[in-house]
Image (cartoon, grey):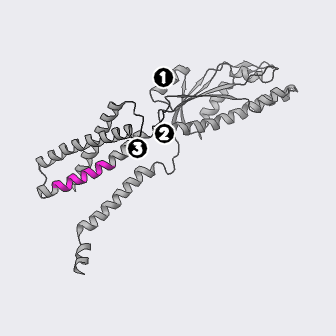
Amino acid sequence: MCVFKSFFSQKRFWGSLLGIVIVVIIFSIAFIGSIVNPTPKDLPVALVVNDKGAELPNKTNLNAGEQSKEALLDNKDIPFKWSVIDTREDAISAMNEKKYYATIVIPKNMSQQILSLQSPSPQKPEVEVIINQGMHYTAANTTKQVIDQLLSKINGQIQDTVFTQLETNKATITPSQAKILSSPLLVKNETVNEVGDHTANGNAPVLFTQIIWIAVIISSVIHFVIMKKIVNGRISIQSVLAQIVAGLLFATAIASTVLLFTDNVLNVNISEFQTTFLFLLFTAFMFYLLQNAILNWL
């Protein structure tokens, strides 16, 4: 009974319990908090409008590109932060610099193509969608889903425009025209900076960071316990320097092991091995210094 009472009266016991609760909260936020209910907001997307417009039979002008642009920019429910770009090439260049998740390109003859839907030789109006997959795989896919919904609405607007014109002119349509009008908008999809195979769907850097985080936490606790026994709980310049050297050694071993094992055993595609190693080494060492500073302070 005395052992039982002595065990549960230890401050270290209740301190470790509090520490475990804090660790669980931190890991829950880090691993689950950001993905439990992800809501896209202010995703940067470029819009290129090249449509020159067209003249209707009643001498009025139709500019489907400008109409689509106004509808997209004025819609506050779209989780995009729009940027209007002059050319397709400029948009792709900006995506290569990680500025946009996607680009919507409206060609210069879109209005002409919409008018042709009433002619004997109809042409589907085209819209090009370019997805920047390498910027962030999950965010790029989310952006693509939202764009598909937007283009579905534009598709319906084109149908309404053509049917209104046909009704006004009391015109009839051929079976081929009816087939095209069932889904008049042609969407051309392209992916730039595509995520390759064996990259965990582009999440390999995140997984590397998580592995390093856990490994460094364990390392820093081990070093702290060892050093505490050696110096009897007293912090000195030598003890701090020893921890820094040990941290650098362990950070090098952790970063090397993560990369070599995942590359050679799990076949993870690591395109810039040296750059990735230096980044993981820096990350691991900074984690170590931060955690050891907290442990020494406590």
Residue of label 3: 207
What is the quadrant of the N terminus in the image? bottom left
Residue of label 2: 201
Vertical relation: 120 (above or below) 152: above
Crowding at dot 3, Cα within 10 Å, few <14 / some 14-19 / many 20+, comes out as few
Give the side of residue 83 with respect to residue 178, left or right: left
For the point 55% across and 21% down, the residue is: 88
The x, y position of residue 18, in whole percent, is 31, 63
Crowding at dot 1, Cα within 10 Å, few <14 / some 14-19 / many 20+, comes out as few
* Nearer the observer, 214 or 8: 214
Q: Which residues are magenta?
A: 214-227
The Cα–Cα distance between marks 2 and 1, rounded to whole angstroms, is: 23 Å
Disc 2 marks which amino acid?
Asn
Q: The residue tagged with tag 3: helix, strand or loop?
A: helix
Residue of label 1: 93
For the point 35% across and 61% down, the residue is: 21
For the point 42% across and 40% down, the residue is: 204
